[in-house]
Amino acid sequence: MAFTRATGKHRRPSRITRTTKSAAGVAALTTTGVIGTLAAPAFAADAASVQQTGLTQAVTIGDTVAEQVDAQAAAQRHAADEAAALKKAEEAAKRRVMAEAKKEREVKARAARAAERKLLNTFVAPVAGSYVSTGYKTGGSLWSSGSHTGVDFHAASGTVVQAVGAGTVVTTGWAGAYGNQVVIKMHDGTYTMYGHLASVNVSEGQTVTPGQPIALSGSTGNSTGPHLHFEARTTAEYGSDIDPVSYLRSHGVSL
């Protein structure tokens, strides 16, 4: 009885056949490039993944941040420069204002000094628009000293009597033969006296300016009628008289 090998799909291949097919399969894969084909896409995917997930984006973001920082620093420097320039301009403007104010004060001070000098050097007649009716050193029995120690200015009763220059009042009130009087110490150290006054409008210690009203003319004391008796003196006392007309003319008063 002969034995035969079974055939069909249930037949188990021999070991040699399986080994040969496996080797042939590997060879076929290698020969056809399937391994290379499978490996290449995997490597490319890994490279793309590296590019998309790390280095390139990190560098791009870093450059943007650096640019923003630089821009912010530049803006801050610009703002600081503008602030410094503004402060410098404000300080310069303040110095200009102070300089102008100082200059203005100096101008005003010079003007005030000039006005004061002008005031001190200004003299006027004791009665505006009047004239001398009795001259200095006129003799006669009307004066106890034998002569006139001043000059008389024509003036109706109640005429305004004015200070001939700048000075300080040293005496006011009744003075015997002079009636009501005012004595003023002038800025140059001389004295002027106004007598026979109807009334006095200033007080002792008061400063007066040229042309300032100080009294009204009258006929008080030893007087023959309304007029102003005016004297120029070296002291405040009687007997130190000097020529009043020469005195006034030396100070620019026309008589």
Image (cartoon, grey):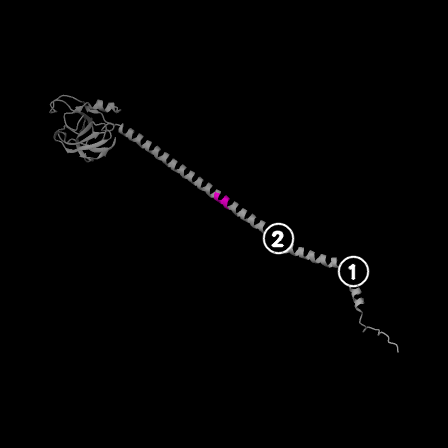
Q: Is residue 27 visible?
A: yes
Which one is in front, 253 or 121? 121
**Above-or-below relation of 72 to 12:** above
**Above-or-below relation of 192 to 74:** above
| Callout in the foreground (1, 2) | 1
Q: Secondary structure at mark 1?
A: helix
Q: Which residue is mark 1?
A: 27
User: Which mark is on residue 74?
Assistant: none
**Above-or-below relation of 49 to 225:** below
Q: Quadrant of residue 9?
A: bottom right
Three-letter code for the amino acid on which mark 1 is drawn: Ala
Q: Which residue is mark 2?
A: 55
Residue at image coords 60%, 51%? 59
Q: Is residue 160 visible?
A: no
- Estimate the x, y position of residue 201 in percent, counting from the top left: 20, 35
| Image: magenta residue range | 76-80
Quadrant of the frame with the C terminus: top left
Residue at image coords 70%, 58%? 42
Q: Quadrant of residue 239?
A: top left
Does 173 appear in magenta?
no
Q: Earlier in the sequence, mark 1 or mark 2?
A: 1
Tally of numbered discs? 2
Does 78 appear in magenta?
yes
Residue at image coords 79%, 68%? 15
Three-letter code for the amino acid on which mark 2 is drawn: Leu
Q: Is residue 246 left or right of residue 74?
A: left
